[in-house]
Image: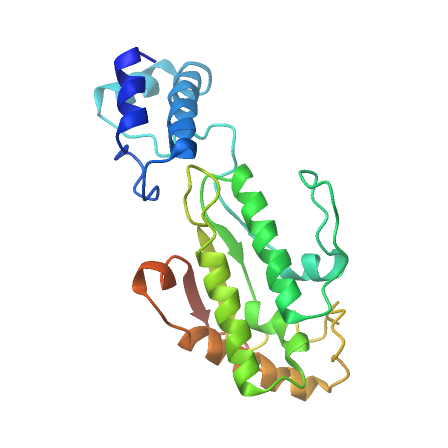
């Protein structure tokens, strides 16, 4: 990278990535790394005619600076519930969560860690369904607080990929899919002695709270939430 370009990166914000809200040391490191990896990708991954077309502006290779990362994928909240938090980049491990707030903390750390391996979004499906066992016996106001904690703690996590907020796709469902209704959940929650009908009520209440949580648009919309119709029980 020429000295002039490097100096521009250090003292001014790059407009190449709109997800990086402000210039910071991590954003500078990201830009330098991407500059090098783009050259590698054009030389080693793409054919000469594709690389030439990109350089001339005939086509655009999206996320060219992330050739060694997976683009995006969905992840299982049930896996975190069953095994706790055990990641190769952490020197400590956590057992399965017994409380909703602890599960949210595990999920937040998991997503922040996974962002280092992905160029795009991290998806979590059945959020309200898999949280339901932790909500048994919980008051309406407490449930609302847990929903707010989940949304805002995840949408305000901006510590990797140049200081970007987590690119998350949370999915909540209006019903339980047929292929899940007979599967026993692996929750270690202390208050999971309620009947399946109680979990169903909590699942619906959870989706209501997740959908109604609002705040400053600059932060509340950082995570995208999709509500999908599924087969009802």
Image quarter (top left, top right, bottom left or bottom right) of the C terminus = bottom right
- Can residue 117 be seen by looking at this rendering? yes
In front of the other: 174 or 82 = 82
Say above or below: 162 vs 209: above
Q: Position of residue 51 (x, y in %)?
A: 33, 18
Which picture quadrant has residue 106?
bottom right
- Can residue 177 be seen by looking at this rendering? no
In front of the other: 165 or 175 = 165
Q: Position of residue 41 (x, y in %)?
A: 43, 20
Say above or below: 34 vs 161: above
Which picture quadrant has residue 83?
bottom right
Q: Position of residue 168 (x, y in %)?
A: 46, 54
Farthest residue in the left direction? Answer: 57
Q: Position of residue 161 (x, y in %)?
A: 45, 38
Which picture quadrant has residue 90?
top right
Q: Residue at x 46, y 15 (%)?
A: 44
Left or right: where does residue 61 sit relative to residue 144? left
């Amino acid at each position: 990278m020429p000295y002039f370009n490097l100096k521009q990166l250090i003292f001014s914000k790059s407009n190449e990535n709109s997800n990086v809200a402000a210039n910071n040391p991590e954003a500078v490191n990201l830009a330098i790394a991407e500059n090098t990896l783009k050259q590698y990708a054009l030389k080693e991954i793409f054919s000469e005619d594709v690389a030439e077309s990109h350089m001339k502006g005939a086509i655009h290779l999206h996320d060219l600076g992330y050739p060694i990362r997976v683009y995006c994928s969905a992840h299982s909240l049930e896996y975190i519930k069953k095994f706790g938090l055990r990641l190769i980049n952490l020197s400590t491990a956590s057992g399965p969560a017994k409380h909703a707030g602890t599960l949210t903390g595990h999920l937040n750390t998991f997503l922040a860690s996974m962002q280092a391996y992905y160029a795009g979004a991290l998806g979590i499906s059945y959020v309200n369904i898999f949280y339901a066992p932790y909500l048994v016996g919980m008051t309406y106001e407490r449930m609302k607080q847990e929903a707010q904690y989940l949304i805002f703690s995840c949408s305000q996590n901006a510590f990797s990929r140049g200081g970007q907020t987590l690119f998350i796709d949370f999915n909540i469902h209006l019903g339980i899919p047929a292929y899940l209704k007979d599967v026993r959940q692996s929750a270690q929650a202390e208050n999971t002695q309620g009947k399946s009908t109680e979990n169903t009520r909590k699942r619906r209440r959870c989706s209501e709270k997740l959908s109604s949580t609002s705040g400053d648009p600059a932060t509340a919309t950082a995570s995208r939430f999709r509500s999908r119709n599924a087969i009802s029980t």
